[in-house]
Structures are given as structure tokens and as C-alpha cells.
Amino acid sequence: MSGPARMALCAMAATLMAACALLPLVDPATWFLQAAILLAIQTGVGAAGRRIPLPRPLTVLLQALVTLMLLTLVFAREQALAGLLPGPDAFRYLSDLLQQGTDDVNRYAIPAPLSDGIQLMLIGGVLVIGLAVDVLAATFRNAAPAGLPLLALYSVAAGLSDGAGEWVWFLIAAVGYLMLLLAESRERLAQWGRVFGGPARSTGLETGGAVTPVRTGRRIGAVALGLALVVPLALPAMNGGLLDGTGRGVGAGGGGGGTISAVNPLVSLRDSLNVNQDRQVLTVRTSSADISNLYLRIVSLDDFDGTTWKPAKRHITAVPEQFPTPVGLGTDVRSAEVRTQVTVADSYAQDWLPMPYPPSSVRVDGSWRYEPVGMTLVGDHGQTTRGLTYEVRSLDVRPTPQQLANAPEPPGALTREYTQIPDSLPDVVASTAREVTDGARNRYEQAVALQDYFAVTGGFQYDTEVEVGSGPRAIARFLEDKQGFCVHYSFAMAAMARTLGLPARVAVGFAPGTPQGDQSVAVGLRDAHAWPELYFEGVGWTRFEPTPTRGTTPSYTVPDAPGSTTPDVPDVARPTDAAPSAEPSESSTCVAQDERRQLCGGALPLNPEKPDGAGPPWYQTAGWILLGSVVVLVPLLPMLWRIRRRSLRLASARHAPASGAAPPVDGQPDGDGAAGLPGVVIDEPSAEAATGHVLAVWRELTDTAWDYGIVPDDALTPRKAAARIARLGKLDEPTARSVHRVAGAVEQVLFAPRPRAVPGLADDVRGLRTSLRAQARWTARVRATLAPRSAVRALWDLSDRWTARKARWTTACAPSTSCTTPASPPSRPGATRT
């Protein structure tokens, strides 16, 4: 392994070892494997640029561009051009994702959930630090300053953690940095020859290489990379607040951590409403005489991206014995404790536990986890509601219109989180909200005006056959068509409320079911429902019902209904065929169209194991990265091969010795004879060094002319070939003399009794290339750079090697037969053989 490649490997390992300090901050740690893959590609690009070699600034620029393309491919593929090239939309999306990551860092406890924003911050930060370390240590060959970006990476992690186990992470980062310095010391000592204090190894009369502090650079890189990838797996995670060392924050508490998220329930909800035969999924018994508020809440959707609403990823904890007081609920609001027993049918398997809101406690068997923000329970390790019977204690909160109207300003942090609207939301949503609420004196009147607009005055019709819709204009189309079901109404009202500065989210669950003769309440699939919740300080999250003919209108939104009295049980509007069936129906009850569209299933089958927006699995990302690398690199292979071949040929001319054994040109036989020398075959391994180097320059000269359209002519002598190049290339007199000078040097080394090198031949070839480039059109210049004609020699070389290898295999397989030389390949321009 060469010195720069060894330094690059050690720089990558040191970066990964320093990045280990970030592992305790986020769960799960799958981002680390993604970062390692992307960092390896970034390091490989830098190694290739130095190998060609490219100028140092160009190498750094190439690494930065590839890094940006990789981040675009992983995080903003849908917004990029061809899924790889970042454009304005991709930059805007990445910026929004970074802002989301910043908000998530402030919101979650340690270990925080791996949201898209946090993942971008982690992987992007590691790649930026890795680029800085690689540039300093490998490109500019100065490893000592590379400790500064490594220290910055460790310091960020140490500042966010609670201090536990910091010495472990510091030790890992320090070992990576010391190995980087050790690798640099090895390279510098090797340049001095023998290392002081250690004898040189020798075998016979041959003296080995210098002894170094470590036996080989490969071992340094292997040990460092192994530590970076293996050690973190054996180390414990730390707990504590991401920005709060005391551990306070969302989800702090006993029982360990974890995250929760869900797929969007739109299609499932419409599916449940459209079944031909209703199916009873829950049997509810409650201590309350009024079931109008007996909404069974499953999950809240509080993340609005302009296209749809979805659950935000949240930290989950162990289920507490007594739930905390709901956020925002004051002591002066009238409430009563209600006991509810729920029995779930064997046919209904739900990952979330349907419960009245807000719950105070729950008694349930199985493995469940608690999400404090939404006050919901989610199944752990495949736990579902199938066949369960559980009891929930909840509060029946009954605020008065006066309390809602006089509610003070909500907290600033809560307002910022629950009033976010994306730039893609059409302006008609906000303008309609302002028009509907014109004249409202406070937030409560605005909320009631929005509810009445959808349920009473706006001319909307309830229709479950309407498509859910997608895209930024989905809400705008619903406001125009005025047809939809509960999803449309709740989503539109919540979005409009946010445009007015009202904190809003959407709840998904079941509306009140149908009372039965045995004092129970039957809840069927067609009771699946979605409704908006708006926040009022002193009351908390408050239900509203904008969907016409569905659910029950809250008493505190009816002006003439006193909030202190218990309203009569309203007649809940239900379809005429909505009587629940005693027997659970199978998938055969789904309509044929739904079966073809694969939409049949239980109500709201939310799946925490497949989070929406969590991105593809790592192997799919790795495949996309590999495909993107192939798409980018394959068209550039001719250019890269040509740059390297030119560099090696001209470098051999600069260092041409006067005599001695000539090494193979370009590090291996070129696969062709002297271009333009018919009947001449040079046995390069036995020729003098001067001959090999001069012929290498001559090959470069003819290939340069070939790239600009002057095809080599095998029938011409070097002198006539030079005259032909000067004539067809319309060279000026100084450049033509340079070409003839190279041709004369070729004749001298071929026919003189003592071949000798001629200095300055490489500059003559560069002058020819500059002259041809200046005269060519821009299309010819682009082709000569990106798709040089002489790059076909790479295929010829592969063909010759394959022919030689087959000949060796034939000889090895038939040792008793006489070996014959394989037939020469067909004649090629500039590659005559005898």
C-alpha cells in the first residue's frame, strides 16, 4: 500500500473513532454504518484524485462535490435531478431537514430518536470532519493539524452528553489520532532510509526496507478501522438530556428508551369506513352516563409537511402507574374521573391501545410502552391489542366557553412546534381561514368559526368515496370540491388553524359507538374517525368536530349550551346499514375493488416497525450509493485513465537516466510498439532506460494528436509522422520544431550505438497539446478531455493480457505439448507488431 493511501485509510479510521463519541446520543446507531460507507467512498475519491494525480485543490473540490452528491442521494433523492444531482429543491429540502434536526436536538432526551434531521446532522458532520482530516493528513501530508477537527467532533459529543463515560470516548478518539501521527512518522522515517535504533533486515545480499515503529502501514489501518467499527458495539449507552445534562426532557424516566412512529393512516381509515358489512372490533363498558365524549384515541398526528399529517417520532418509556397531569390542564376546569373497560375482538390487532383522552392510568397485560407527549401506549416487540381486555381511568374534561375564550397565550415553545406550516402550503388555505374567522375576537371564536364552516355553513358534504389525495394542493382541492370524509375535514381544519397561529394537531381513533341492551357500547370499523385537537392554555388539548354527520359536536362549542350541565346524549348520525355484526367478518367482506387495490384490512393498522419518512434500510441506501457511484464514475473512466497514462509517461521522461535497465513503461508493458515505427519491436525490459523513456514520450505525443483527430499512421517513419502531425494540426513553427525534436530523439535511441536520453521532451509534448487545444473547437476540446480517442488502448491492453493469460493456461494444462505463440491481435493505429 502506498504512503498516501495508507494515510487516507488512517485518516478515515481516526474520524470514525472520534465519531464513536456520538453513539450514545442517538438510538438506534444504524447511522454509524451509513456514515462509515459514505466516508469510505469520500476517502476513495480522494485517494483516486491523488493517484492520478490531480492538483490538490481539484482533489479537495472533487471530494466535496462527491460528498454533496452522496448526501443528496441518501436524504434528498426525490428532490434531486436524476436522484443524484442537487438542485434548488434539494438544497431547500436539506436546509429544512437541518432545521428539523436542530429542533429535534432541543426536543428529545438522550438517547434521542434517529429522525431524518438528526441523521443528516450526524452523517453530514462526520463527512465534513472526515474531509477536513483527509485533506490535512493525506492531501497536504500534515497529520498534526488534523487533530483539531477530530477534537471538534469529540467536543460536540462531550458537550451534549451528561459526562458519563467521557474518558472512554476520549481514549478511543486519542488512539485514532495517535495512529494517524504514527502513520505519518512511518512515512517520514521511511524517506530517510534506515530507522535509527533498529538494524535493517536483509536476506542474502539484498537489504530489506527500513524498520519502522509499526511493522506495516496495513496493520495500522486495519487495527484502527477495526477499533472504530468493533469497539462501539461493546460499549454501553449513556442517558440524559440531549441539551440538558440532568436528563429532563421528553421521555425521560425509567424503563429505558426507544422511539415511536407510524405510517400514515389515511388509506386504512377510508378502508374501514367503506367496508360492506360493519364489523365490531371493540366492546366498551364505561362508568359515565354520557357517551357523547367517549372517543377512543389511538394516536395523534402532529407533523405536517404540507402534503399530509403524520405522527412525529417520539421517545417512549415504561408505562407509569399514574399518568401525569395533561399538558395545559388547569385546576379550575371541571373534570370527572371515568373508568372504561375495553374488550378487543380477536380479529382486530392494533399496535396502539385505544383509550379515552386524557388517560390517568391503565391496567393492561402484555408488553406496552408509554409515549408521554401524546399520552398513548404502543405495543413493544410485536405486542398488539388482539383479544385483550384492559381498563383505563381517564378524565372527562368539560371546559366552559368562557374558559376557552379567556385562555391566555400558550407557551412559546409549544406554539412554535404546533403552528409550523411548510412553504408549499397553498395560499388559499390561509386566506380561507382568515375569511372564515373574520370578526372573531379570540382564539376560541376562531376555532368555533372553523368548525362551523365545515360542519354547518360551508356547504360541505360527507363522502367516503372521495380519494384521500396527495401533494401540496390536496387541502386546496378539498376546499374547492367540498366533498370528503373525516380525514379531509380534520386535516383541513388543523392546517387552517395553524395558519392563524392556533396550535393544532389531528387525533385518530374511534368515534362513540352504539349503545347495546347490556349497557355496553359496540364500536365497529365504521366508527373509525379522525378529528382535530386545538390547544388552549388552562384546558389543554381540546377536541373539535368539523366533520358533518359524524361524531358529536362538543358542548363547549355550542353557544346556547351551558358548559356546567350535562347535555343529553345526542343521536349520533350513522349509516342505515351500520349495525355491527356479532361475528367478525373476513377479508371477503371487502369490496372487490378494494381487494384489487389491496386496501382491505383492520381499522388503522399503524405499524411502528415501519416508520413513515424514516428512509430506506441501510442496504438499500448502500445499493443506491453504489449505483450512483457507477453512474458518475463509469463515464469518467476514459478521462481518468488518460490522465494517469499521460502523467506516468511524462514523469518517466523527467526522470530519465542515462543508462541502465528500463522499467516497464507506465508501470507495465504498454501493450503496443513504437507508434509510427513499422517493423520495429522494442524489448523494453532489456533495453536501456533512455530508450524506454523516449518511446513513452513518443507514444504520448501520438496519442495526444489522436485525441484531437489525427489518427496515427503505422506506415510512416517517426520523422514523416512528425511532419504529418505538424501539417494536419496546423502547428506554428516552434511547436512543429518540438514535434520533430521528439521524432529525432526516437530515431536516435533506436538506431544510435549508445542510446541516450534527451532532456525537455515532456515539455515538447505539453506544448503540442496546448497548441492543438487552442486551435480546436469547444466540442473537440470537450471530447478530447472526457472521451479521448486514445483511451481505446485500455481495451487493447485488457485484450492482450487476456490472450497472454489464456496462452499460459494452455501451456499449464498441456505441459507435454509444444507451446505455440498465440496469434497477434489485429493491426491497430499506432500499435504495429511483427
Image (cartoon, helix red, strand yellow):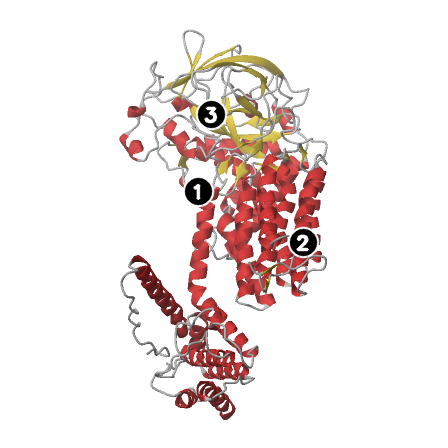
> How far apart in space, not on screen, are marks 2 and 3 (Cα)?
54 Å
For the residues carrying marks 1 and 3, which lies nearer the camera in this image?
3
Give the residue pinned by disc 2: 213
Marks 2 and 3, the one that precedes in the sequence: 2
Q: Quadrant of the C terminus?
A: bottom left
Marks 1 and 3, the one that precedes in the sequence: 3
In the rendered image, the residue lying farthest to the top is 518
Residue shown at 55%/22% (left/top)?
A: 357
Q: Is residue 821 above or below residue 751?
A: above
Residue shown at 69%/60% (left/top)?
A: 195
Please tell me whether mark 2 sits on a helix, a strand or a loop. loop
Q: Picture quarter containing residue 830?
A: bottom left
Give the amino acid at mark 3: Gly
- Residues tagged 1 and 3 counted as in contact (Cβ below 8 A): no
**Nearest to the observer: residue 378 or residue 267:** 378
Residue shown at 46%/15% (left/top)?
A: 388
For the residues carrying marks 1 and 2, which lies nearer the camera in this image?
2
**In x, y percent, where is residue 598?**
33, 33
**In x, y percent, where is residue 353?**
50, 22
> How far apart in space, not on screen, are marks 1 and 3 (Cα)?
34 Å
Circle 1 packing at 10 Å, graded few (<14), some (14-19), many (20+), is: many
Give the residue pinned by disc 1: 474
In the rendered image, the residue lying farthest to the bottom is 733
Give the amino acid at mark 1: Ala
Give the residue pinned by disc 3: 382
Drawn side of residue 619 relative to residue 276, left or right: right
